[in-house]
Image (cartoon, helix red, strand yellow):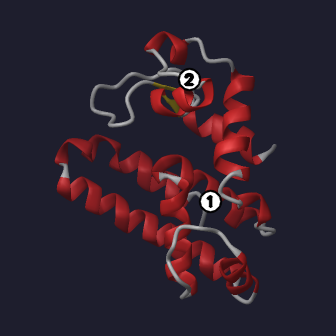
Amino acid sequence: MTLIDDLLKREGGFVNDPSDRGGATKFGITLATLGWYLGRPATIDDVRNLDIEVARAIYEKRYLKAPGFDKISWVPLQNQLVDFGVNSGPQVAIMNLQEILGVETDGILGPKTLEALKNSDPTRVNVSLAKRRIMMITRIVRRDPSQVKFLSGWVSRALEFI
């Protein structure tokens, strides 16, 4: 099973929960992300009719290759960074990684970040990243209690990577 297959399994089919700040999604692809891919504003029907192969292409282009996560050689960390990027944006995932590594937090997965990662214990980095995700999730719910309905799923998802 590939990283993208795992993502698709976690994300599931069409959902349009009014409490979800991402709006309507299918396979985890939001209106905004699908609009980016289509080059025009997407509609709920566009999301509802999204083909799984288009979702795969979006994940590969926007969440694996564009942020540079394909350069991460340790697969468990690569998987978590992609998943974190899908949920919170690739730049947020990279900035959290950079803070763990003690390098400049510019949100760009460049040579300095990759070198620091190469010289780190990937298991420790991966666990630290999951902890940061959980802390971030709790801050989101504290600021906006309407998001508590997603808390268990979000935390479980982050814990999958430990």
Q: Is residue 3 left or right of residue 18?
A: right
In the image, residue 146 sits, relative to residue 131, either above or below, namely: above
Q: Is residue 72 left or right of residue 134?
A: right
| Residue depicted at x 43% and y 50% | 154
Whole-angstrom CA distance, mark 1 to mark 2, is: 21 Å
In the image, residue 124 sits, relative to residue 26, either above or below, namely: below
Q: Is residue 137 left or right of residue 131?
A: left
Which residue appears farthest toward the front when viewing the image? 39
Q: Position of residue 25 (x, y in %)?
A: 48, 27
Count of residue discs: 2
Q: What's the residue type where badge 1 is placed?
A: Gln
Q: Position of residue 151 (x, y in %)?
A: 34, 49
Label 1, residues with CA under 10 Å away: few <14, some 14-19, many ≥20: many
Residue 58 is marked as none
| Residue depicted at x 60% and y 62% | 161
Q: Position of residue 120 (x, y in %)?
A: 69, 87
Q: Quadrant of residue 62?
A: top right
Q: Which residue position holds label 2?
A: 13
In the image, residue 30 sits, relative to residue 113, either above or below, namely: above
The reply to whether dot 1 and dot 2 touch (C-beta < 8 Å) is no
Q: Which residue position holds label 1?
A: 80
Q: Position of residue 53 (x, y in %)?
A: 75, 24
Among numbered discs 1 and 2, the one appearing first in the sequence: 2
Which of these two is toward me, 89 or 110?
Answer: 110
Considering the numbered disc 1 on the image, is that residue within a helix, a strand or a loop?
helix
Q: Quadrant of residue 79?
A: bottom right
| Residue depicted at x 61% and y 30% | 37
- The quadrant of the picture occupied by the N terminus is top right
In the image, residue 39 sits, relative to residue 70, either above or below, namely: above
| Residue depicted at x 58% and y 57% | 160
Considering the numbered disc 2 on the image, is that residue within a helix, a strand or a loop?
loop
- The quadrant of the picture occupied by the C terminus is bottom right
